[in-house]
Amino acid sequence: MKITFMGAGSTVFARNVIGDCMCTEALRDSVFALYDIDAKRLEESRAILEAMRAAKGGYGKIECYVGVEQRKDALRGANFVVNAIQVGLYDPCTIIDFEVPKKYGLRQTIADTLGIGGIMRALRTIPVMKGFADDMEEVCPDALFLNYTNPMAMLTGFMLRYTPIKTVGLCHSVQVCSEGLLNDLGMQDKLEGRKELIAGINHMAWLIELKDKNGVDLYPEVRSRVDEYLAKPDACNKVRMEYIKHFGYYVTESSEHNAEYNMFYIKSKYPELIEKYNIPLDEYPRRCINQIERWKNEYAEILETGVKEHTRSNEYASHIMEAVVTGAPYQIGGNVLNTGNLIENLPADACVEVPCLVNGYGVLPCRVGRLPVQCAAMNMTNINVQLLAIEAAVTQKKEHIYQAAMMDPHTGSELDVDTIKKMVDDLIEAYGSFLPAYH
């Protein structure tokens, strides 16, 4: 069996996913093909994974492939392809994502999923993923593509609508959603045996049902504790708690993410909201800088003291592969196309996040029915942007970029149409060779 990791220079994530595979009897004898366009980063990943492989008993084999010219060989014969690329990296592209909009008074927190930053990230990533899909169609047409790269709904939606590759989008937030909520509200005694239903779109999937081990609805108690939580000055999850208060339900992704997915919280006319809701503006660039420094120190420590023990995580990838290979069923929250009315009150072209059964037949999405109308309405404000960004990538028409930005809740609530178009033009100019189609 062959497992190919695209963007393996993302060493921490590659180590976690492939480390999980090495901890799994059904997967540990695989060929692990590491692909990246950066030879130095790839070598760091190889060194760590080889040490980890030796520590786990020497099973399997690691192969490395560098650059576009070796991409087909990396993919050839793969059973599973894990995607964790970041086109343009922190420098220059993430810096541009934040600094150019800031000149127009548009502030962001993460900018990798929605907003002007998410739109532009999709536009520079989709052509690269189209290249992956073309190669896969030729050399591994039956492989399952596990996408971890953001913006999740735009990239996964593109792959599912415009390529023949079997694709599922995977995020980290579904697994920890209800646990985080109950911990924040001091309801740890309800964790064991709880039952939940989560559905919507990536980063804005709704915790529709939450019951304790006896089937008792926990939402009345959750809602009764929200005001007390919001009154804490240093609480970091206030935006999501506000969602419970005003929309009735909790969402999967963090408050710093959700602060920029709507028109409510980051407003130049109401600067006091930033402090009131503890919204960390420019958060993602800070994380990038810290992560680069942290990894430099960690790599030096590993070279000196050796690889730390890895235990299998709750990351979906290895569990999906194991379920497909062995046929033993496993449930995930997966990003899939809304085919067959999985969520009735969202469009068929939308990429939705719903419970999925995984077994020997692959990833089988489960039908959810209707979302509460207010939850579907919130999702649609994001889906509108996602569909327009995909349209821009497919048609290569600049007007669809303008329209995606105009329809974005945060951007459209802060800037007028002419300013939005000028900002988009400035961004395209700044990205240069990363967005050649629009020059």
Image (tube, grey):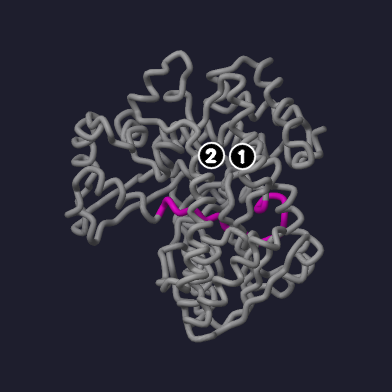
How packed is label 2: few (under 14 Cα within 10 Å), some, or many (20 or more)?
Answer: some
Seen in the picture, residue 389 relative to 132 is either above or below; the reply is above
Would you say residue 359 is visible in this rendering? no
Q: CA distance from mark 1 to mark 2?
A: 7 Å
The residue carrying mark 1 is: 94
Residue 245, how many percent across, how many down? 29, 30
Residue 12, how many percent across, how many down? 52, 61
Q: Give me the residue at 17% from left, 54% from top.
A: 189
Q: Which mark is residue 14?
A: none
Q: Which residues are magenta?
A: 159-174
Along the line of sight, which residue is nearer the eye, 347 or 183? 183
Q: Are the residues tagged 1 and 2 within 8 Å (C-beta)?
A: yes
The residue carrying mark 2 is: 285
Along the line of sight, which residue is nearer the eye, 20 or 348? 20
Quarter of the image containing the C terminus?
top right
Give the mark nearest the N terminus, 1 or 2: 1
Q: Amino acid at mark 2?
A: Pro
Would you say residue 368 is visible in this rendering? yes
Q: Give me the residue at 76% from left, 71% from top.
A: 73
Q: Give me the residue at 62% from left, 74% from top.
A: 32
Residue 45 shown left or right of residue 394 in the figure: left
